[in-house]
Amino acid sequence: MHRSLAQDLSLVEMASSSNRSNTRRHTSSTASAHSSTIPGSASASTSSSGAATTSYHSSVSCSPPDSLNATLSPALSASSSTARDASSRPHVLSHINDIFKCTICFGRLEDPHLCPQCSKLYCYDCIGEWLDSGSSQSCPNCKTFLQLDQLVKVRWFDDIQKLQRSLRALTCGSEERDGKPGEESIVPASDLCPKHRKRVNFYCSTCEQCVCEVCATGGDGDAGQHRDHTFKALQVTYEQHVALLDGELEKVEHYRDKLSLLLDKIDRNVELIRRVKTVKHKELEAIMVAALNSLDRQEEQKLMKLRVHQFNLMTEIEEVNEKLQTMHYHMEFHSKPQLIQMKPKIVAACDAIRLLPIRDFKQIRVPASLKIEIPHLFETGVFVVQNFSTFDDNKVVYSNEFSDCMGRTWRIMAWCVISEDHFGIYLELVHGRPCWMECTFQLIHLEPEKTITKTIRQYFDRTPQKGWGLRDFVTLKTILEENYLRLNDSLELLYNIRPCSPTETDHALDADESSSEH
């Protein structure tokens, strides 16, 4: 098989040798013509560009940059003369493409504009976004202060695009006239054999390297170098390597997806912590309001007692003043005999006033002390119910145990009753003395207004009771249709519990239950 392949390649080489020799002679005869340039050919296409709109722009040249002229001159020579070597055209096209790239997005220029200071080319949208972002008000290349209205529109860019299309048409036409795939005209240097400058078409499995037909057939004095080696078509080997690399990249992408999933879980955890913080912040505000109200209530009670004493003393003082005024009147306006006769009455009245007991201030005094009354704090947390879609009928899951402010241990229980379309939430006392508890449960939704909140007040001991939770907290249909279920198939339940005192209504309900039991 190797010998027949070598023979076939030799025949192909012999058939094309005459064409290559003609190409060499043609190339040598046109070498000097290829090195010539056409001065001003690129700038001539810009005669219709017009002047800039501001005085700042008028000082900027609207002709192509010098580097472009140096590149376009041989390109124009090649496009105007059929005697040029077609092998230079792809290199010229590649160089033109490198020049006409946006310096910001590194893509093909769209509506190109240039900096009037350094003449660097940018897409209008790219440089506009750069300048409008606020992070920089200068040219990305020369760092000169730059505003959007100072940019110069590249009006000769359409001519350059026409030139590129002409070069591509000439290159394709030369390939068709030669009747071969243009190995030496459009093949990138990386795809050529470094020794024979021929297209690399084969892969030597023995040497593990890519070779051309000359290397494979042993031509040009290379006989024996790859003798009896195993060859494969380069395209087949390439596809095998691509398939292998695709598999490896797929594994890396899977690894990246796992990292992204972990990142999403961390982000959600952060969001839940912030939500709990918001709840605790509201709790602190409520505690502050309650404490202030308690201070106001204590102040009012103590001041009320002092106001009663104030009123009694002021009334007594007014009565004494009236009696003093009467006695002063008698002493001033009665005659001396009359005053002498009234003396016993006046003395008796004075004695009666003085004999009235005056209360000791210690008996009236109200302690000037106020207590800050802080209610019991809520124990707040989030219970994440995992793998919700795998729940069976009467499936029960428990949260981790946690403690309240009094040291009791609790846990949350979620119960899925598929047959009745119910999802229930319960609170269970694991350890500690029985007590009354206020419990608030929330089924969290990404849209806050859809979050479901329900509260119960119940007496808890270690004997299970039906009032310990909410059997019909929400229907399973609501969970699925209203998007309460997270992408990772979980539900998020926020709970708030704290000890409380029974209200009069709670006492009445307890009495009714006791009487019904008897």
Image: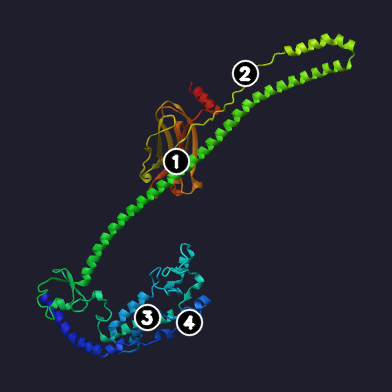
- Label 4: few (<14), some or many (≥20) within 10 Å? few
Could you say which disc has been placed on residue 362 in the image? 2
| Residue situated in front as seen by the camera: 375 or 350 | 350
Query: Which of labels 1 and 4 is toward the front?
Result: 4
Q: Can you identify the residue that label 4 sits on?
A: 49
Q: CA distance from mark 3 to mark 2?
A: 108 Å
Q: Can you identify the residue that label 1 sits on?
A: 494
- Which three-letter amino acid code belongs to the residue tagged 1? Leu
Judge whether 389 appears above or below 337 on screen: below
Quadrant in which the N terminus appears: bottom left
Name the secondary structure under disc 1: strand
Q: Residue at x 25, y 91 (%)?
A: 29
Q: Is residue 74 left or right of residue 513?
A: left
Residue 273 picture location, percent across and down: 43, 44
User: Which is more N-terminal, label 2 or label 4?
Assistant: 4
Q: Residue at x 88, y 17 (%)?
A: 333
| Residue situated in front as seen by the camera: 500 or 270 | 270
Residue 281 picture location, percent across and down: 49, 41
User: Which is more N-terminal, label 2 or label 1?
Assistant: 2
Could you say which disc has been placed on residue 164 in the image? 3
Name the secondary structure under disc 4: loop
Query: Which of labels 3 and 2 is toward the front?
Result: 2
Q: CA distance from mark 1 to mark 2?
A: 54 Å
